[in-house]
Image: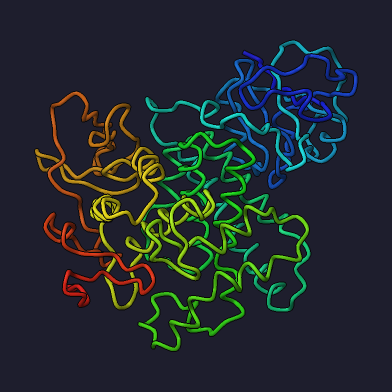
Amino acid sequence: MNDVFRAGSGNGPENASGIGGTMSRQSNADDSVHITVDELKVGVVCSTDLLDEEGKLLLGTGTRITAELIQGLHDRGIQEIEISAADASKMRGGGAGGEGKRRTPRRRTIATPRGSSDGTSWPKGTPLKPSMVDRHEESLSPERTKQLRQNLQVAREEFETLRMTVMEEKLKTISAMKDLSNAFAMALVDDHDHAVGEIVRPTSETSITDRSVRLAVLGMAVATEMDLDGPSVLEVGSAGLLHDIGLVKMDPEFSKPNRDTLSDEQMWQFRKHPLVSSSSLKEISDVPNGVLLSIEQVHEQYNGSGFPFGLEGNRTHQYARILNVCDTYLQLTMGASFRKPLVPHDAMGLILHQARHGLFDPKVIHAFLRTESLFPLGSRVELSDGTVADVIRRPVDGYSTPVLEDVEGGKRIELEKGELQIVRPVIDESCNQMRLSVGEMQSLYWNPADELLINSGESPASNS
């Protein structure tokens, strides 16, 4: 097998109907060259989306070339990549292939070019969800895990640069955040369950950067489930990444991981941070208005109990309503010095109970449940035969029968076959997690303004 990826040289959306769609065959083949997979330069970021001839995404825009990725192309039988001459000069790492030989394509395998105004080939008005690759029957890929972790490390580096420019009031563009949103969105398209499970799963890391990346990825996953189009999904990601950027200008106590409870005066100041974040970005020309609005409104609640304005219902932007649910889940599963984190299953249960009281947009809640299921991706459970397993895939139908992988043997477990059942979620001791009973889920109230769980008597819930 000697397959070829092809990167088209179209000039914009008029040449493409989107990822997985049909693309004009009138790209200029004379301007393309072939380079071997071995010539690819490790560390270079793809500037085009590479699709197979069935329209399925294989390499996305923003994907960084790694040795493992090159080996993966070999494993799929891909020996050469056909791309534009300009891209070849950027992606070639000096292998034995020379300048690349111009030739007529041997396959009609098309790669979608970067052509639209937002830097992606996703057209407005076309839901992103149908473009997602179905990997339900596959195991999680070690190469994909490495790529996701590498993307997270890049995000940490970019956030450090962003933090300095915001503090010095020298920020001129959010292009780096848009690139990060695109890279993680492409990861979601390539393997939704793996991306959400790897990035969003609870860890002991609670920095602003990691929290923001988790919010962006989870928000984009929910937005995709709600049938938002590609450009809108990317804007949700950018809003998630930037929603707390104003904290770098405020009291350092607000930004500390696992910070203590705040005094009344500190809390009054803290509740201004969405406005400070938005204000820090208002003069940046490439920040969409929807991103600014959602950054201001991410802590507003559907019943009007949020801050900073107490907006109610659909008066808040759709992006903000999506991110609000996702942010609540992350706060509950990440915890604070004054509140232990919940196991993901119990955080999901508590959110569902709170939704009955009107705290969240019902449409977002339904999409969030479909995105994570009752036993969220990346969490760990115990089965009726005593087996401990990780949740690796969402159920095809329903919410309670995810696909699992045995922690000890790595065996795939299909709960839909009915042979085993989940008896309880497993507490991650390294994260100091706690559980809630069903009765506590029903009686406790989540007060997002103070980040506290309170009971019907309005006293802090026990963390023991």
Q: Nearer the viewer, residue 24 or 74?
A: 24
Quadrant occupied by the C terminus = bottom left
Residue 168 pos. (x, y %): 73, 78
Question: How many numbered marks are there?
Answer: 0
Q: Residue 71, image x and y in percent?
A: 58, 33
* Observer-nearest of 320 and 311: 311
Q: Residue furthest right?
A: 30
Corner quadrant of residue 156: bottom right
Residue visible at 45% across and 43% down in the picture? 222
Q: Is residue 354 left or right of residue 192?
A: left
Horizontal arrangement in the rendering, residue 263 relative to residue 342 (left or right): right
Q: Position of residue 129 (x, y in %)?
A: 51, 31
Query: Which colour style is shown?
Result: rainbow
Q: Is residue 117 above or below residue 9?
A: below
In the rendered image of this protein, does residue 309 appear above or below residue 79? Answer: below
Q: Residue at x 38, y 44 (%)?
A: 368
Quarter of the image where one finds residue 32: top right
* Residue 33 image-quadrant placement: top right
Residue drawn at x 78%, y 23% as measured from the top left: 15
Q: Quadrant of the N terminus?
A: top right
Q: Relative to residue 267, is residue 94 drawn left or right?
A: right
